[in-house]
Amino acid sequence: MHKNLVVWIVPLFLGILALAGVEGQTPAPAAASSSSTNAPSATAPAQPIPLGNVVTEAVTISGKLQDIQAGLASDQTVATVNQSLPAIVQEINQRESDDLKVQSAGPTLSTLRSSQAAWQTISNGLDTVKQTLTGRVSQLDKLVGQLGDMNRTWQVTLASANTSSAPPDVLNRIQTVIANIGQQTQATRELRAKILSSQSDVGSQEDRIKAGLAKISDQKEVAIKSLFVRDSAPLWDFDSLEAGAANPAGSTRVSFGEQIQALRLYLADKMPTLFIHLLIFIVLAIVLVWVRRELQIRAGEDPAIKHAANVLELPLATAMVLALLASGWLYPLAPRLLLAGLEAAALIPVVVILRRLIEPALFPILYAMVLSFFVDQVRSIMTGLPVLSRLLFLIELTAAIVFLLWLVWSRRLSPEKVRDIQLERVVGVYARLALALFGVAIIANFLGYTHLSYLMGNAELESSYLAVILYAAVRIADGLIMTALKIRPLSLLGMVQRHDAMLGNRASLVLRGVAALFWLWETLELFSLRTPLGSAVMPILIHTDAQSGLHPALLGRILLFAFAIWATFSISRFIRFVLEEEVYPNWQLGPGVPYAMSTIAHYVVLILGFLMALNVIGVNPSNYPAYTVLAGALGVGLGFGLQNIMNNFVSGIILLFERPIKVGDVIQVDTSIGTVEKIGIRASIIRITNGSEVIMPNGNLISNPVTNWTFSDRRRVIDIPIAVAAKSDPQRVMAILVETAKANPSVLTNPPPQVLFTSLTGATLNFELKAWTAKQDLWTQTKSELFLAISAALARENIVMS
């Protein structure tokens, strides 16, 4: 308890002290940096090349100029940009056209969010081109400067050669070098001009992207503010509905035809990517088929991998899910039809896999989600027909409510039908929440608040799809992790062999936590809550300063510091686990050495973690005088008020390094005898023979006399005094005592038991039996057994004990 308090309170106190110093002080500016900034930069004047070295230097500089010429001739920056920029321009044009169509139909938040993501993807692609151009311009600027330095050096050399009346050959060579430098300088500047021109073209497209993002952002803000404003006619206003539904068939043909054409053009451009995606699927399928065969062979030997074998029983479906998870990276700016096809291709194998992983009582949920998903895809194709899409959405929501009511009231989720209690509770709560959201969406749709209706309904549906896919992905990952722990090379590790179930459970918990956070993050965005929540929370966590920019605020620093300390303790536990399970069993270490190494590693990690935590929150003690003063005051307080604690701490370090006492040793302090169970940061725990635990300060173990019964080995001598009547035969008594001791299994034969005739009085003969035992923790019991055996043996021989 005291150890935990010290280990936690000291870092937190110092962290709060550091935070106080950060908040209350402004870092002092570095004088050297300031002076160096204000000092004007001076360029050293060019020095002429000695005439004797002109020829050698001319040959060297000619080689460098040839390399520069070859590099400029092979430069493909402009060609690469000219090849990639038209495609980006086409994507921008298509995006602007699509946005106009969506805006004319009244965009929903879901549509605006998709459009914003598409614009951001285009922006990321253009940023790559922009960075390439910027980097190349910087290189050319540096090259122009180097050529200028060369030119000045050789111009000075030419002037010096003219003054020194150098031979004409030397003068001609110098002039040739100067002419070549001028040619390469001109070529470099021409290439830089072309790249700067390309930069201008990229900048123009960047302006268009920024305008598109700004327009989408404004429309999202307006859409959020107008969620509770009626934007369409109520469903009972048939005249308005008929006016909005004019010529539906023609509009559908135009909209669907445009989407088919966009899909054809996109796939024609992505044929290499399609082959790569197919290759990924084939490789995954081959690997998973092999893994399934291995699991089937081992399943009979180890029942723990039965779950993994069940997950990977469908390797093709699993490979398809894993391969389709990469679609977002392989197909940026994919057309709506392609996205719908990929989502459908992912959902079907997910359902097939989940049928093997969940109880049959939950099958209807999967079927309902598949049906709802395909209805959503039909609606997405009919975005140009607002009235028809609205009616179809209303039918879908009504069917979802009917299904959820049946699901809840039919007791399909009862514990008798769903064995996974945690899953049953989550699904039950989620179903009731979805009922409420779908109900609000239907009412909003009836009343004409279509934006609100689409937001609530679409967000809940998409969130449900995401939850199902993530659940399947986690279950598949569980199986893959368990498989990895059961096959080489991980199965060769000792810690895996002994703790495979624990490691699998911990990894599963991490996966579930990551999946839950990802689902929450995406769900907040689906409900358009991520931005407002971020706007409300970020000012509390991050402070903006005009001089230093963004940096954590006080609460943000506290959270970062607490997370860093938690991560430090977690890393320390993991390191000690690896040492104890994988390293120590393979090394021949002395008693107590593993414990000492683990404890020292723990302290080192804690100290490094604390220093890194200070660095994470931006604390540099040398820049904050208040921190130094307060830390000095804390040091004085530790010196006077906590000197006993510090003495015990240092004594604990001495115990760990010098190891006069080790964990497991049997020691005697004063009259207390017990086993050392733990050497802590302040005190050690000793369990004495009566079962109680003594908290012994480490300083007492260093400064006071301590008897270590097991310092060099674990053998202990048992001294038993025996007194018999004076008329007894001493030789016979000694033989009986030795035979009795040898008969006890706890007594060692080497060294053998020994009997000493200690004294002779008028009425008694006094003997002492010395017997050795290696069972240190049972020596009192062995002594008792010897007393009983000696008493019985002497009684059988009619020898009277005094």
Image: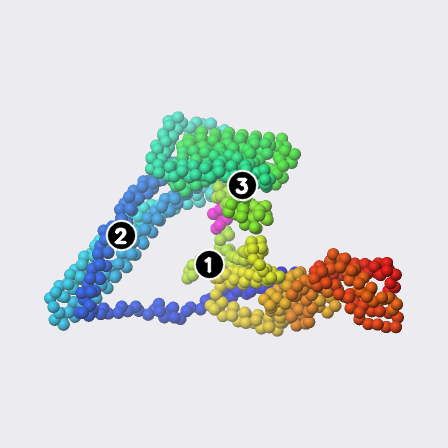
Return the residue at label 2: 196
Q: Residue at x 88, y 70 (%)?
A: 763
| Separation of residues labelled 3 and 1 (CA atoms) | 42 Å
Residue corresponding to mark 1? 551
What amino acid type is highlighted by mark number 1?
His
For residue 479, which numbered disc appears in the image?
A: 3
Q: Is residue 49 left or right of residue 781?
A: left
> Residue 636 at what x, y percent from top left?
58, 73
Contact flag, marks 1 and 2 (Cβ < 8 Å): no
Give the secondary structure at mark 2.
helix
Crowd band around label 1 with a 10 angstrom C-alpha radius: few (<14), some (14–19), many (20+): some
Task: Pick whichever, 610 or 793, lies toward us.
Answer: 793
- The spot of residue 774 in percent (x, y) is 70, 60
Residue closer to the observer: 201 or 508? 508
- What is the span of residues highlighted in magenta in the rendered image? 528-535
* Label 1 residue SS: strand
> In which quadrant is the N terminus drawn?
bottom right
Q: Measured from the top left, where is residue 509 in percent x and y?
A: 56, 46
